[in-house]
Image (cartoon, rainbow, N blue to C red):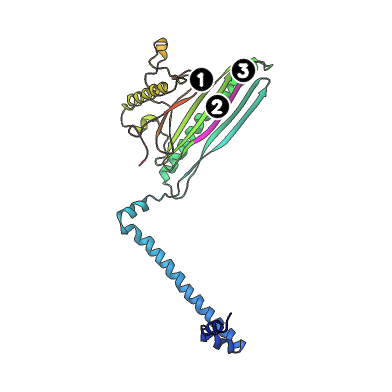
């Protein structure tokens, strides 16, 4: 550093600091404590001011514009928790016979913010689903054990697997899938779907989603359209449709209580088990309905 630069730097030093450096250490300590208290006081006022401003923003925002108010209404509140736990595990292996059955149970954990009537209805819906699943799995287990008695040496090939999956869990809908795979030479899968409307707490049937029974024909026509389109695009895809050789198997229309679930995007999926509308090698098949037919998206 040159002499000129040194003098220039010294000249820029605040005279206050020079004066403080000349003071006794005790005096400087007292003044520093006073300044720290002043700073804390100033920061305290600033913090209170910011908090007050934030509160003002929270109070005022919904009144500023319709768009902000609408967005504010869309902020989700704490919803009642619906979850699935494994209530029973049944596992048996005897020779070539095997069972692996996981029995699910729907649990409801209501939050304080939830409406009392909805909480009660949710619990009733969960109880009904649990009773239905328990009855179904009890029957599967009973049939498996009957097979063991008829074949004590376990020579016959027989395998049963039951599992579950939460396919949808949104603010509006909760859908549970329970699947049953039985293998006796070849495999056969059957799926069961259970849907709860969180806003009402009720279990939902397909008919509940529509105002009249015209949905049966509307959905059936859309499924036929998709079947024809898929078969035209892929020669390996086959449905029982417009086939004169298996006229009695050709798909005509869905059942009024057809299996379904609602996706997390709010669209409707119509589901069929193996062999219902196509050869067994096609497995369980489903068809997504266009939003113009039905959608839960607001």
**Looking at the image, which residue is at 50% across and 77% down?**
39
- Nearer to us: label 1 or label 3: 1
Q: Quadrant of residue 207?
A: top left
Counting residues from the start of the chain, the first of labels 2 and 1 encountered is 2
How far apart are the alpha carbons under marks 2 and 1?
25 Å
Q: How crowded is mark 3: few (under 14 residues within 10 Å), some or many (20 or more)?
A: some
Q: Position of residue 3 (x, y in %)?
A: 57, 84
Q: Are marks 1 and 3 in contact (CB under 8 Å)?
A: no
| Element carrying mark 1 | helix
Q: Position of residue 110 (x, y in %)?
A: 48, 45
- Residue occupied by mark 3: 147
Q: Quadrant of residue 186?
A: top right
- Residue occupied by mark 1: 281
Query: Quick check: is 163 in the magenta stretch?
Result: yes
**Looking at the image, which residue is at 37% across and 18% down?**
252
How far apart are the alpha carbons under marks 1 and 3?
26 Å
Q: Position of residue 87 (x, y in %)?
A: 57, 35
| Element carrying mark 2 | helix
The boundaries of the magenta stretch are 158-166
Q: Where is residue 189 in the image (x, y as percent from the top left)?
A: 52, 23
- Residue occupied by mark 2: 137
């Amino acid at each position: 550093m040159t002499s000129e630069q040194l003098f220039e730097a010294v000249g820029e030093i605040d005279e206050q600091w020079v004066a403080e450096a000349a003071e006794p250490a005790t005096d400087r300590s007292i003044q520093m404590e006073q300044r720290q208290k002043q700073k804390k006081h100033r920061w305290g006022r600033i913090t209170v001011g910011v908090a007050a401003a934030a509160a003002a923003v929270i109070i005022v925002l919904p009144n500023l514009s319709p768009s902000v108010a609408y967005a504010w209404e869309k902020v989700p509140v704490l919803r009642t928790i619906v979850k699935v736990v494994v209530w029973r595990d049944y596992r048996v292996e005897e020779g070539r016979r095997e069972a692996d059955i996981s029995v699910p149970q729907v649990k409801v954990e209501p939050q304080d913010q939830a409406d009392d009537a909805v909480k009660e209805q949710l619990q009733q819906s969960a109880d009904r689903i649990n009773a239905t699943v328990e009855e179904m799995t009890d029957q599967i287990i009973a049939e498996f054990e009957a097979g063991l008695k008829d074949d004590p040496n376990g020579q016959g090939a027989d395998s049963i697997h039951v599992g579950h999956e939460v396919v949808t869990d949104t603010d509006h809908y909760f859908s549970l899938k329970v699947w049953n795979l039985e293998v006796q030479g070849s495999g056969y899968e059957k799926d069961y779907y259970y849907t709860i409307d969180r806003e009402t707490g009720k279990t939902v049937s397909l008919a509940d989603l529509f105002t009249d029974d015209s949905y049966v024909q509307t959905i059936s026509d859309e499924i036929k359209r998709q079947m024809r389109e898929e078969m035209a695009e892929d020669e390996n895809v086959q449905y029982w449709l417009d086939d004169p050789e298996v006229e009695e198997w050709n798909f005509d229309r869905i059942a009024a209580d057809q299996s379904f679930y609602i996706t997390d995007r709010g669209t409707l999926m119509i589901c069929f088990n193996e062999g219902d509308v196509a050869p067994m090698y096609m497995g369980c098949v489903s068809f997504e309905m266009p939003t113009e037919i039905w959608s839960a998206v607001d």
